[in-house]
Image: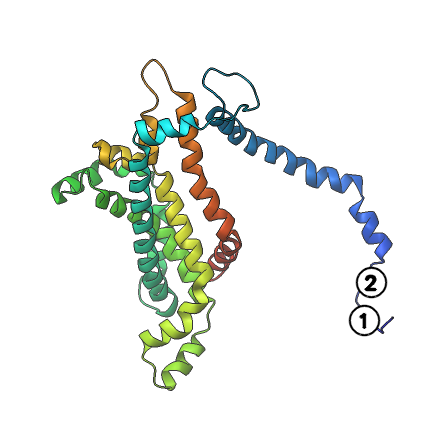
């Protein structure tokens, strides 16, 4: 059955044969798939060897883990205390995610909806903080945390990670809120809503991609943060995963199998987060980058 198709004047019609030839163009294949394949190999080979070390028996040198064993995971989880490290990382990561997201929404809304003196300078300062290495802030932060009693405390890690997550999170959230027209809030206020209620009912539901993007980056940055956890925590029962993994490396030897098993367990939550929210991340980052 055929149907008439209306073609807009000036539209270039590409025959199906030309499309097929373009897909089979060897030059295009080389330009596109060879670099992607090289990058994929460069990225996945370290993960493959980590799986090999984690799953093959101790002392084996086979490039394929067979027979598969989970003894290294049991060693890491039970003997090294990885269960405690994992729980601490989850606690710090979730709290940092929640606090960062809430403050970023409030700060982003203020930057997006209000025009005040020094707004541009404030955003420049937020951007400039991203160029300051965290190592430069260790001594003043340690002094402040010691006076507040936050050393050897998971709350201190939450505060430190949240502070360093906030500048970029506020900027991203500001851009995303700017993509929501203020006229819809004005219409809600005309109908009797307060500004806060209008934000909750109208704006917040449209910020889901931005909330997921900001929360995901905050969680992943906190999950992988090694420097703060090493400097502000010295008790083993408060270690997070990166610090706990470092203790599998001794002065004269290293338990590579246990280290690989711990690395697999540490990478799984991050991989799962990216697999679930990757489409929201792209949307949220692009919206936060072009609006303001």
Q: Looking at the picture, how far across and down is residue 168, in whole percent? A: 38, 51
User: How far separated are the C-alphas under marks 1 and 2?
Assistant: 9 Å
Quadrant, the C terminus: bottom left
Choose between 59 and 262: the one closer to the eye: 59
Q: Residue at x 37, y 53 (%)?
A: 124
**What residue would you read off at disc 2?**
13
**What residue would you read off at disc 1?**
7
Q: Residue at x 32, y 61 (%)?
A: 107
Position of residue 36 in the picture relative to residue 59 (left or right):
right
In the picture, the disc for residue 39 is none
Eyeballing the image, is 253 above or below 22? above
Question: Could you tell me if the residues under marks 1 and 2 are in contact, i.e. CB atoms within 8 Å?
Answer: yes
Looking at this rendering, what residue extends furthest in the top direction?
252
Tag 2 secondary structure: loop
Q: Residue at x 49, y 53 (%)?
A: 277
First in residue order: circle 1 vs circle 2 = 1
Q: Quadrant of residue 75?
A: top left
Q: Looking at the picture, how far across and down is residue 50, in whole percent? A: 49, 28
Q: Looking at the picture, how far across and down is residue 208, in whole percent? A: 44, 62
């Amino acid at each position: 059955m055929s149907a008439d198709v209306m073609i807009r004047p000036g539209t270039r019609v590409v025959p199906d044969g030309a499309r097929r030839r373009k897909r089979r163009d060897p030059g295009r294949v080389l330009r596109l798939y060879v670099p992607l394949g090289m990058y994929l190999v460069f990225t996945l080979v370290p993960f493959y060897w980590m799986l090999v070390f984690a799953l093959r028996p101790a002392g084996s040198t086979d490039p394929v883990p067979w027979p598969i064993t989970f003894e290294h995971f049991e060693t890491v989880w039970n003997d090294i205390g990885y269960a405690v490290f994992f729980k601490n990382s989850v606690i710090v990561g979730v709290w940092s995610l929640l606090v960062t997201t809430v403050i970023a929404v409030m700060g982003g809304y203020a930057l997006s909806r209000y025009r005040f003196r020094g707004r541009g300078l404030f955003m420049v300062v937020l951007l400039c903080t991203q160029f300051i290495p965290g190592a430069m802030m260790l001594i003043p932060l340690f002094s402040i945390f010691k006076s507040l009693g936050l050393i050897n405390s998971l709350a201190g890690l939450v505060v430190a990670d949240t502070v360093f997550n906030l500048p970029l999170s506020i900027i991203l959230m500001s851009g995303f809120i700017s993509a929501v027209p203020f006229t819809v809030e004005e219409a809600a206020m005309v109908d009797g809503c307060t500004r806060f209620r209008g934000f909750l009912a109208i704006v917040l539901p449209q910020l889901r991609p931005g909330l997921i993007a900001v929360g995901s980056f905050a969680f992943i940055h906190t999950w992988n943060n090694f420097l703060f956890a090493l400097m502000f925590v010295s008790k083993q029962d408060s270690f997070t995963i990166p610090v706990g993994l470092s203790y599998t490396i001794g002065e004269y030897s290293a338990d590579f199998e246990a280290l690989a098993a711990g690395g697999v367990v540490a990478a799984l939550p991050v991989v799962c987060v990216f697999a679930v929210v990757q489409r929201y991340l792209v949307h949220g980052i692009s919206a936060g980058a072009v609006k303001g």
